Image (cartoon, helix red, strand yellow):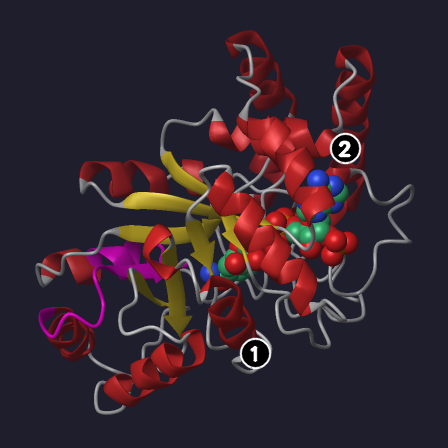
């Protein structure tokens, strides 16, 4: 398990985030052997990186930091990276990732620029996020050494299983799974579909007329709710919190190198560590695979649950 740091620094999307909670999560996580922290320059206009930098200042050597840039202009990538290094108060990034595919720049030039940063020792490994088969194939075709692909993966969002995971496995590209709780929906936060706030109802699971929606598909609200009800029933039978079940299911998947959980305080961390220590029985994994299959078929193999068009 790794710590998802999107909320750090606070901002419109996640609301306020106290630095004292970030410090406490970082220290408690490191003490528990959770060493990977995932941030991005795009999270709260750099404040997530800044906040994580403060939290890890005295324990940098114990941590692995992953950060991302959305601006892949080869000419300005070195400056982008310098900004991240400064905000994170470090002189190297363990995993430097492209945040979303960006067709604006030729992949070979982008990869050359990233390789140069690696040669200089400023980044230790290169990763991508939200790359579909076509985008990955372009990278593979130029011989780019991509270590990881970071993708949305949870019980209600299984698109990557169909084509992307097999391709990544074939090329030894690790999968970093994000949004294991579908931003709280799989933590049983909401009692009705309508009370799910705009941020969390903009995904392709929902109708396109939801307030912050950026897709134009029909959504699958009936299937989503039916699937959630079935998951709820299993949680009641097994006496398990839904968050633990959801995280443990992702962790049970051998294709996943690391599951990134957005963790805002030590209370959430304590609960999520229970998931790390819970090895889900194979028959329960299978049961959950079966009951979430209709939703997978309904939403299909497109792994872009935000826009529907950026992962190809
Ligand atoms: N590469 C990409 O494009 C991309 C996209 C999305 C995310 N990510 C990365 O993946 C990380 C994880 O995704 P995410 O944060 O969006 O979604 P997530 O991990 O599915 O959900 C995070 C939210 O779940 C709630 N939560 C966490 N533990 C909980 C628990 N034990 N019980 C109840 N609620 C709990 C928290 O909500 P509260 O706010 O209510 O406390 C938290 O903010 C991000 O932080 C980011 O690093 C990457």
Which is more toward the observer, 115 or 133? 115
Graded by Cα atoms within 10 Å as few (under 14), some (14 to 19) or many (20 or more), the crowding at tag 1 reads: many
Expressed as whole percent of the image width and height from the top left, the position of residue 21 reads: 68, 59
Q: Which residues are magenta?
A: 119-137
Image point (9%, 71%), residue name: 119
Residue farthest to the front? 58
Picture quadrant where residue 280 is located? top right
Residue 306 lies in the magenta-colored region: no
Label 1 to label 2: alpha-carbon separation: 34 Å
> Quadrant of the image for the C terminus?
bottom left
Residue that label 2 marks = 228
**From the viewer's perspective, is 70 left or right of 209?**
left
Q: Secondary structure at mark 2?
A: helix
Q: Is residue 220 visible?
A: no
Expressed as whole percent of the image width and height from the top left, the position of residue 135 reads: 29, 61
> Considering only vertical position in the picture, is 18 above or below 36?
below
Image point (84%, 54%), residue name: 196
Q: Secondary structure at mark 1?
A: helix
Q: Which mark is residue 47?
A: 1
């Amino acid at each position: 398990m790794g710590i998802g740091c999107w909320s750090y620094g606070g901002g419109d999307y996640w609301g306020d985030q106290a630095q004292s909670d970030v410090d406490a999560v970082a220290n408690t996580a490191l003490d528990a052997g959770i060493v990977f922290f995932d941030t991005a320059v795009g999270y709260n206009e750099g404040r997530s990186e800044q906040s994580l930098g403060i939290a890890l200042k005295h324990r940098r050597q114990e941590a692995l930091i992953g950060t991302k840039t959305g601006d892949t202009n080869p000419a300005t990538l070195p400056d982008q990276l310098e900004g991240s290094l400064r905000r994170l108060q470090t002189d190297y990034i363990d995993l430097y990732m492209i945040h979303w595919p960006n067709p604006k720049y030729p992949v070979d030039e982008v990869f050359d620029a990233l390789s140069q940063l690696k040669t200089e020792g400023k980044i230790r490994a290169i990763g991508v996020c939200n790359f579909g088969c076509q985008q990955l194939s372009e990278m593979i075709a130029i011989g780019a050494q991509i270590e990881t692909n970071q993708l949305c993966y949870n019980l209600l969002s299984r698109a990557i299983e169909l084509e992307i995971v097999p391709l990544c496995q074939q090329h030894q590209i690790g999968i970093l799974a994000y949004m294991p709780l579908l931003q709280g929906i799989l933590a049983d936060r909401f009692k009705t579909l309508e009370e799910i706030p705009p941020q969390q109802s903009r995904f392709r699971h929902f109708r396109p007329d939801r307030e912050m929606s950026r897709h134009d598909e029909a959504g699958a609200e009936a299937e989503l709710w039916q699937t959630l009800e079935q998951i709820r029933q299993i949680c009641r039978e097994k006496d398990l919190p839904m968050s633990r079940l959801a995280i443990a299911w992702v962790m049970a998947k051998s294709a996943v190198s690391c599951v990134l959980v957005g963790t805002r305080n030590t209370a959430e961390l304590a609960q999520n560590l229970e998931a790390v220590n819970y090895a889900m029985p194979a028959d329960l994994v299978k049961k959950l695979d079966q009951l979430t299959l209709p939703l997978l078929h309904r939403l299909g193999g497109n792994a872009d649950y935000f826009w529907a068009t950026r992962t190809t």
